[in-house]
Amino acid sequence: MPLDEKGLLKTIKEVKDKSEKRNFAQSLELVINLRDIDAKKPEGKIQELIELPHTMETGNRVCVFASGEMALKARKAGADSVIERTELEGMTGDKKSQRNLVKAHDFFIAEAPLMPLVGKVLGAALGPRGRMPTPVPPTADVTEHIKRQRKMVLIRLRGQPVLQCRVGTEKMPDKEIAENIQTVIRRIEGRLKRGIKNIRSVYLKTTMGPPIKISV
């Protein structure tokens, strides 16, 4: 069930108006509070990768594990990092470089033949965070995959019945932010056993601003 568009646009404007001006474009964050959810049961283990219709100005930082031609194309496409086999092998056992790599990126893509090595070297760093790479065949259009990853958000239920993700930045048009929010709500509603009835409340806030309730 889509949210009321007029009410949603009004809330987005209010969130922006009440946010103190900073010397950077703050993110807009959606907070979804759930009810009647048991995180220990399969239906309560929510982890969704959602592609938003509109890219945020500060898009996701994407790392590509690739070799040869795909590595060249990934660099040309503007990937934030391209890690080839030798560099990846060099991270074996180096916890600091592994942590730094994970911290510096939001999403990961791996040329399929490199997936076993990625799992061996970085599985312990990426797996628990739900951020294992998306495997793609060597002949795939890595440019399109990078574009898609820049529009992705990962939403996870971690113990508490709360889901949170970025849906835009202050500089984005209100209508685009609204469409991103609607996309997330529809996806989560479809994932919940009782749909919208499992959603207690929804809030929107800027990085440093107060949360404002969205009517559901």
Image (spheres, helix red, strand yellow):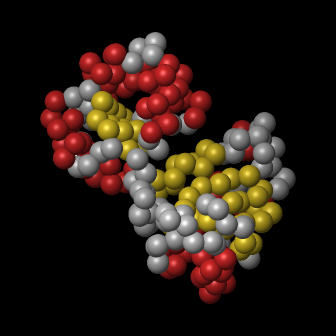
Q: Residue furthest bottom?
A: 6
- Residue nearer the viewer, 36 or 117: 117
Q: Residue furthest front?
A: 23
Q: Residue at x 44, y 24 (%)?
A: 97
Image side of residue 91 versus residue 194, left or right: left
- Residue nearer the viewer, 92 or 38: 92
Above-or-below relation of 14 to 181: below
Q: Residue at x 60, y 50 (%)?
A: 155
Which quarter of the figure has residue 32?
A: bottom right
Q: Residue at x 33, y 44 (%)?
A: 80
> Can you see residue 187?
no
Image side of residue 168 versus residue 162, left or right: left
In this rendering, the count of numbered labels is 0
Q: Residue at x 46, y 25 (%)?
A: 98
Image coords of residue 164 (percent x, y): 65, 54
> Can you see residue 54?
yes
Which quarter of the figure has residue 166?
A: bottom right
Q: Quadrant of the N terminus?
A: bottom right
Q: Residue furthest right?
A: 36
- Residue nearer the viewer, 59 or 135: 59
Q: Quadrant of the C terminus?
A: bottom right
Image coords of residue 184 (percent x, y): 58, 62
Image coords of residue 150 (percent x, y): 40, 53
